[in-house]
Image (spheres, grey):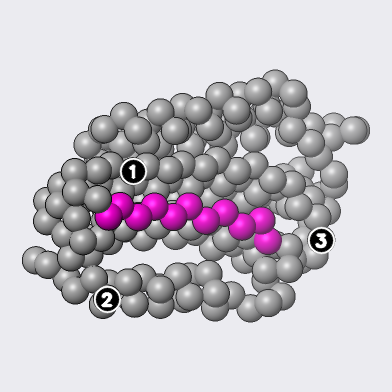
């Protein structure tokens, strides 16, 4: 079924406001935000974009946002793929942790088109300052490239989700295993994991 492009664009804009813009100001004061947007408009074209973010945050409030949005608009035989993978480490035991994670995929006024979005967010808090080891940083860089390769590989969406789940789990394991503290890491207070594939 063909959906009017203007209606779909309006709906997507409202959805982003709900998912991202409607967060109270106090929740975004300590946010590390990642937004991956992909829109395909040319017949027979395929566009993909992926990002992997690792960040350390301090302060009493963490309101990190992670969004992947893919749209195929007014084209024939086109494909859009957006992938956002994020890990946020909140140091110093913040009192408020309100992360948001979302994947949005939509086809607008197109035929034989496909859109896919994948968002993975891992948030953990610690009781003191930490850093990622050099080996951890090196592996994160490798995983960033592997995620980009997966997004561009032309996999069926079910297979792409399985591959991204695997790489995201490895990303989480690297963060868990390679976080270091000057006097040894004592106690990861809380963990939050959210995965949101959409097509």
Q: In the orientation shown, which residue stands out farthest toward the right? A: 183
Q: Position of residue 117 (x, y in %)?
A: 36, 51
Q: Position of residue 181 (x, y in %)?
A: 84, 35
Look at the picture and state if 108 lies above or below 37: below
In screen coordinates, is 137 left or right of 143?
right
Q: In the orientation shown, which residue stands out farthest toward the left? A: 1
Comparing 179 with 199, the one in front is 199
The answer to whether residue 145 of the structure is visible from this angle is: yes
Q: Position of residue 92 (x, y in %)?
A: 83, 53
Comparing 27 with 115, the one in front is 115
Q: Which residue is mark 1?
A: 47
Q: Which residue is mark 2?
A: 6
Mark 3–mark 2 distance (CA, rounded to whole Å): 41 Å
Disc 3 crowd, CA 10 A, few/some/many (<14, 14-19, 20+): some
Residue at 55% from the left image edge and 74% from the top image edge: 21
Q: Which residue is mark 3?
A: 59
In screen coordinates, is 23 left or right of 16?
right
Q: Please, what secondary structure does the residue beneath circle 2 have?
A: helix
Of mark 1 and mark 3, the one earlier in the sequence is 1
Of mark 3 and mark 2, the one earlier in the sequence is 2
Residue at 48% from the left image edge and 75% from the top image edge: 17
Magenta run includes residue 116: no
Comparing 91 with 41, the one in front is 41
In screen coordinates, is 152 left or right of 62?
left
Residue at 55% from the left image edge and 40% from the top image edge: 52
Give the extent of the magenta segment: 31-41
Q: Please, what secondary structure does the residue beneath circle 3 have?
A: loop
- The quarter of the displayed image where residue 8 is located: bottom left
* Label 2–label 1 contact, CB within 8 A: no
Residue at 79% from the left image edge and 36% from the top image edge: 131
* Label 1–label 3 contact, CB within 8 A: no
Of mark 2 and mark 1, the one earlier in the sequence is 2
């Amino acid at each position: 079924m063909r959906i009017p492009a203007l209606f779909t664009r309006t709906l997507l804009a409202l959805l982003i406001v709900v998912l991202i813009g409607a967060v109270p100001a106090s929740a975004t004061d300590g946010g590390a935000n990642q937004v991956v947007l992909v829109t395909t408009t040319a017949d027979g074209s395929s566009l993909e974009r992926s990002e992997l973010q690792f960040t350390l945050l301090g302060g009493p409030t963490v309101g990190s946002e992670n969004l992947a949005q893919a749209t195929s608009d007014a084209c024939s035989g086109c494909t859009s793929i957006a992938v956002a993978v994020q890990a946020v480490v909140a140091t110093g035991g913040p009192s408020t942790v309100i992360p948001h994670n979302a994947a949005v995929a939509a086809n607008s006024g197109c035929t034989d088109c496909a859109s896919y979005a994948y968002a993975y967010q891992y948030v953990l808090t610690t009781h003191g300052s930490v850093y990622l080891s050099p080996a951890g940083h090196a592996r994160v860089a490798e995983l960033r490239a592997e995620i980009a390769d997966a997004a561009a590989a032309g996999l069926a969406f079910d297979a792409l989700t399985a591959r991204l789940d695997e790489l995201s789990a490895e990303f989480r394991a690297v963060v868990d295993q390679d976080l270091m503290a000057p006097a040894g890491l004592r106690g990861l207070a809380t963990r939050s994991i959210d995965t949101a594939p959409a097509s």
